[in-house]
Image (spheres, rainbow, N blue to C red):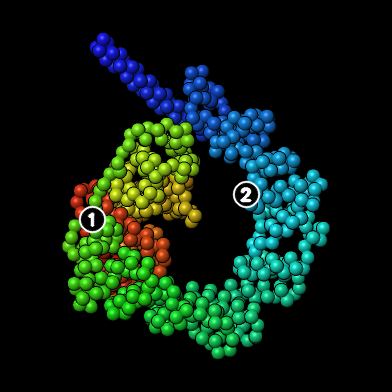
Amino acid sequence: MTKLLTVARISALLGVLASVAAQAADLDQQRELFRAVYADVERGSWQQVDDLTRAEHDLLQRYVLWPDLRATWLKANIKQVPAVEVDTFLLKYGTLKPARELRYRYALNAVRDGDLGDYLHIYQQFYQGQDIASLDCLALQAELDAGRPQRVIHRAIDLWTVGRSQVKECDPVFKYLGTKHLLGDADYRKRYALAIEAREFALARWLGKKIDAAHVETATQWQQAQANPEDFLRSRHRGNSDTLRAQLAYATERLTYRDPEIAHELWNRLLRTQPFSEKQKLLSAQHIALWTARDNLPGAYSRLNALPPAAQNIEVLRWRARVSLRSANWNNLLVDISLMDPAEKSTEEWRYWRAVALHRSGQVLAAREELELLSGERSYYGFLAADELGKEYALGDSRLLVNETMIAAIEARPSIVRARELFLVGQDGRGRSEWDAVIRYLSDEEQMQAAILADRWGWHSRAIATAARLGEYDDLALRYPLPYQTSFEASSTRASIAPTWAYGIARSESLFMRDIRSSAGAVGLMQLMPATGRDVAKELRLPYSGLTTLTHAETNIRLGTTYLGKMSQRYGGNQVLATAAYNAGPHRVDRWLPEAGNIDARIWIENIPFNETRKYVKRVLAAQAIFHWRLTGQVRRLSDELLQVRPAASEPQVAQR
């Protein structure tokens, strides 16, 4: 009997395994079918789907992304598709993101077709109260068309009373307000003030025409202060009004970005003739002092130190410390750090530099004690502290604990299945959106297992981000993965750079997201600007098709490593300068080079004027050290990459330690 039960159990297990294998095979085929037809469907053609065999069509229709495919076709054909077909789809799939996107497209199409009543019905059900100006104004227009102006006036005036140009969808409603003389002098004055405050001077000038000539003239003066601040400060120093003083303070702020020295000279001249408020004096002096320090100009420390106590905020103290560091004034540096609040002085940055200052001041034991504590951190400053002491890096690699039962439950969730499939068929951005929407509702333990799951799929951005959300930083294989290893190694070799450096750049730029686009327009895994990608592709004689090329991972790696290699060559192999140039541009890095004398790369990094670039360089250097350990199992000292930064010169930088 026992033997028979064992055989039965084995047979059942084999049946389950066979079923799982069949489902996996179906999924693989469903993905291939989806990929094969999607491009044509996106262009509005359903023909490729109709051409599938009956079995293929049935298989595709059972795919979790079938609603996405159908919604894509409906959106592409929204002008021709019968409303009943859209309504049927929305009724069936209304909770899914593709249905929500289709509903939005359908609502806007109703407006284009002049069916404002249909739009208003959708708006009231799904968009009312979300404070989306374009949708709100379309709803107000629908109310006007329906002969219900009483529902419009209050909300329309609220939408009009902003300090910027409102979205174009509001134009018909605002025209109605003007035609019916519903905007009075007080309304125009209120919006005028908001526009001045928002520095939207062209809008203010337009509004001024509705008030009086004096308001037009004042807005024109603001425009002059914005466009030519130095000329404005030299020519407009006479007069006595709060408005003039506000304009002069603004022009000083604008000029300071370009030339702190001239701004300082003209501001001091104005102080003798204009009774500025204490706040204006404090903010202008603070702004000039900070940019004197950021631009590494003479007298920076004196200006920062001379600021009154009310102006000695944390940013001033940071730059006081950086200027002291640059001039190797260790006693001043210790004082500057001591004046910081406890939270700031306890950051790794100032703990490290305090230890260095103590050591340089002869307080060796106190310095060593701080460095010992800091060397236990797996970070830029932790590695530098370990280098100072000659200690091993704290590269403790601790894999996340796996709960297979929980992973299986998470993997079976329909929302997670959808996110995974979107990623696997190349709809990465849509997949990330769905993943993030689900993850926030999971428990911490479930999120940890979800991170492991994403890592197994090779979805590194979600694995890294999800683990970081929990403060789980010790699984280095998960947090510093090695995707596209063949491409990174081959392309880096061609570019004469270390693949670990390229990995550090890619992780810092995109978390290995091949499709991501920054607000500045940089695209892909290594975040290349389209113009840079085009130029490098031309140099390499590679085909270039804009976004299609830049979002192809292997091609992006080739272009990115080549450009990084060019930056390395430009700066004589100095990775610090080349990394900064990759982020901020070589023209800026050239301006940041010392005029005379070499400077310690660590100190040069701390004095990078841009907060983003300063943090970026540190992040890339630390990541490179970890990637080197991941690839080789050996430690490469961070300090080995910190070459001396030489003065600006016509010839490329020459590497010096």
Element marked by disc 2? loop
User: Quick check: 224 above or below 35?
Assistant: below
Q: Residue furthest bottom?
A: 272
**Residue 388 position by quadrant:** bottom left
Residue at 18% x, 60% y is: 391
- Label 2 crowd bin: few (<14), some (14–19), many (20+), radius 10 Å: few
Q: Which residue is mark 2?
A: 130
Element marked by disc 1? loop
**Residue 369 position by quadrant:** bottom left
| Nearest the eye: 417 or 343 | 343
Q: Which residue is mark 1?
A: 394
In the displayed structure image, the side of residue 94 where residue 116 appears, left or right: right
In the displayed structure image, the side of residue 147 where residue 319 appears, left or right: left
Name the image quarter holding the N terminus.
Answer: top left
Q: Where residue 365 is drawn, which disc sits there?
A: none
Q: Position of residue 25 (x, y in %)?
A: 39, 24
Asked whether the viewer can see residue 451, the reply is no
Mark 1 to mark 2 CA distance (whole Å):
48 Å
Q: Amino acid at mark 2?
A: Gln
Residue at 40% x, 33% y is: 409
Residue at 68% x, 43% y is: 123
User: Quick check: 585 above or below 268?
Assistant: above
**Residue 625 position by quadrant:** bottom left
Which mark sits nearer the N-terminus, 1 or 2?
2
